[in-house]
Image: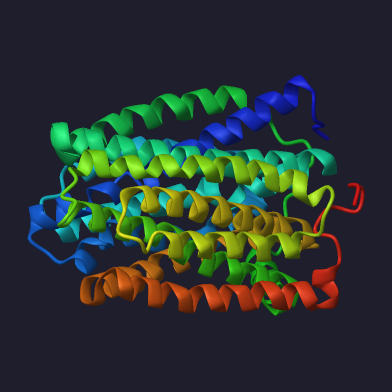
């Protein structure tokens, strides 16, 4: 097993973080471009949202198939295949001449990204020691936020200077370089055992995971959390580009630097589970994120930035704890369990976009506050239910970790 403070741990965790960074660069490259693309294709805000939603929905739908395949051939081969597809699809995207074709290309990209996202944590759960696992998961999710920042900011600046095609070309080249680096850095698996009776066994595993309250509740928390987090940023982009602010798309994309607070809080979540139960941490993260949305209600750029910092901190803290909870609590088919969590996570993000952007389009920021509050109340109720239950009161850390 790979333990902390070893060369192998540093190589493996760096490779996984680098892959996580790349996945989120590609996934959210188009998010800051939405106002620009809406103008380019002469469509509404809700229609242009398909450029983000198509990728996240396709990712959600294909997570479990990738995870099932990984139970047969291994986690590392699946991750490498996934990464090798990214530059190919990136260059294919350049042939799209309509919003429909571009959205379909983005769906292909989401399906390719799902391979790495579905099995990375399962790789860690099988190869890392218990004390290394949560630290590695926290670092992995911190890389999520860094990738989200880099992808969005580069998308905003590159598209304004070179058009969306220029942004796609740069990302495809970067994806090729990173995929090659991970091939050489990521250690071979030593503890993977291929599963037999694949389809039937994994179908049964899916049903078992969904019927286990401590897993299904954490999955729903992840879905609602992401529906709020990612789409509050999308709406904020539309808000800044519109009157009275009229901020250029490139500069509006700088709001994604607020993700840095999430990078810190995701890393801190690993420390939290070593001393406190995970469930109350999810409640805390939800409250911090909700406070951020309300702070951003004020008509001030400073209030918006502070609000986004709080939203990022709370959302990533909750996500890290819920994600780690599922990977630990699943007794069998860990890749399928973490894939199911991500299905809820990305499906929530996709559907939440049409919900919150619709609130913005028809009712403005006040409508977003009202619609978002409903989701925060739902997520708070799910967190509290997990907390007060017998399972929720137990420690979210692994048995060998200090309480």
Frontmost residue, 251 versus 102: 251
**Is 199 rendered above or below residue 248?**
below
| Residue 140, position as x, y percentages in the image | 61, 40
| Residue 192, position as x, y percentages in the image | 75, 44
| Residue 231, position as x, y percentages in the image | 38, 61
Q: Quadrant of the N terminus?
A: top right
Frontmost residue, 151 versus 59: 151
Frontmost residue, 14 versus 73: 14
Q: Is residue 272 left or right of residue 305?
A: right
**Is 389 rendered above or below residue 68?**
below
**Is 150 rendered above or below residue 379?**
above
Residue 391 shows in the view: yes
Q: Is residue 307 left or right of residue 143?
A: left
| Residue 210, position as x, y percentages in the image | 66, 75
Where residue 271 sits, quadrant-wise, is top right
Outermost residue toward the top in this view: 7
Residue 81 shows in the view: no
Q: Residue at x 79, y 38 (%)?
A: 132
Q: Residue at x 14, y 32 (%)?
A: 162
Where residue 319 sits, quadrant-wise, is bottom right
Q: Is residue 218 left or right of residue 131?
A: left
Where residue 124 sits, quadrant-wise, is top right
């Amino acid at each position: 097993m790979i333990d902390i403070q070893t060369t192998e741990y540093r190589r493996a965790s760096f490779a996984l973080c680098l892959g996580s960074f790349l996945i989120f660069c590609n996934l959210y490259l188009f998010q800051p471009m939405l106002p620009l693309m809406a103008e380019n294709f002469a469509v509404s805000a809700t229609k242009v949202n398909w450029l983000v939603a198509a990728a996240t929905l396709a990712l959600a739908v294909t997570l479990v198939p990738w995870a099932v395949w990984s139970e047969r051939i291994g986690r590392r081969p699946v991750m490498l295949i996934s990464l090798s597809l990214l530059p190919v699809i990136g260059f294919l995207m350049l042939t799209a001449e309509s919003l429909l074709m571009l959205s379909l290309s983005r769906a292909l990209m989401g399906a390719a990204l799902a391979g790495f996202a579905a099995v990375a944590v399962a790789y860690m759960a099988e190869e890392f020691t218990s004390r290394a696992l949560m630290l590695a998961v926290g670092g992995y999710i911190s890389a999520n936020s860094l990738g989200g920042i880099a992808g969005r900011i580069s998308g905003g600046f590159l598209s304004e200077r070179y058009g969306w095609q220029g942004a796609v070309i740069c990302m495809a080249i970067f994806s090729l370089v990173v995929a090659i680096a991970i091939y050489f850095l990521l250690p071979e698996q030593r503890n993977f055992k291929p599963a037999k009776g694949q389809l039937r066994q994994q179908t049964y595993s899916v049903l078992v995971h969904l019927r286990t309250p401590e897993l299904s509740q954490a999955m729903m928390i992840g879905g609602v959390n992401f529906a709020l987090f990612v789409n509050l940023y999308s709406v904020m982009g539309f808000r800044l580009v519109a009157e009275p602010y009229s901020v250029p798309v490139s500069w509006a994309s700088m709001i994604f630097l607020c993700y840095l607070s999430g990078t810190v809080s995701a890393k801190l979540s690993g420390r939290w589970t070593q001393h406190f139960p995970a469930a109350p941490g999810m409640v805390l993260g939800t409250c911090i994120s909700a406070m951020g949305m309300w702070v951003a209600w004020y008509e001030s750029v400073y209030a918006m930035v502070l609000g986004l910092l709080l939203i990022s901190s709370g959302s990533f803290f909750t996500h890290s704890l819920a994600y780690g909870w599922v990977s630990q609590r699943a007794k069998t088919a860990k890749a399928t369990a973490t894939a199911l969590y991500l299905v809820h996570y990305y499906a929530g993000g996709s559907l939440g976009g049409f919900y919150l952007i619709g609130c913005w389009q028809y009712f403005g920021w006040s409508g977003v506050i009202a619609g978002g509050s409903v989701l925060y109340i739902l997520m708070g109720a799910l967190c509290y239910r997990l907390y007060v239950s017998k399972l929720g009161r137990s420690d979210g850390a692994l048995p060998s970790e200090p309480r």
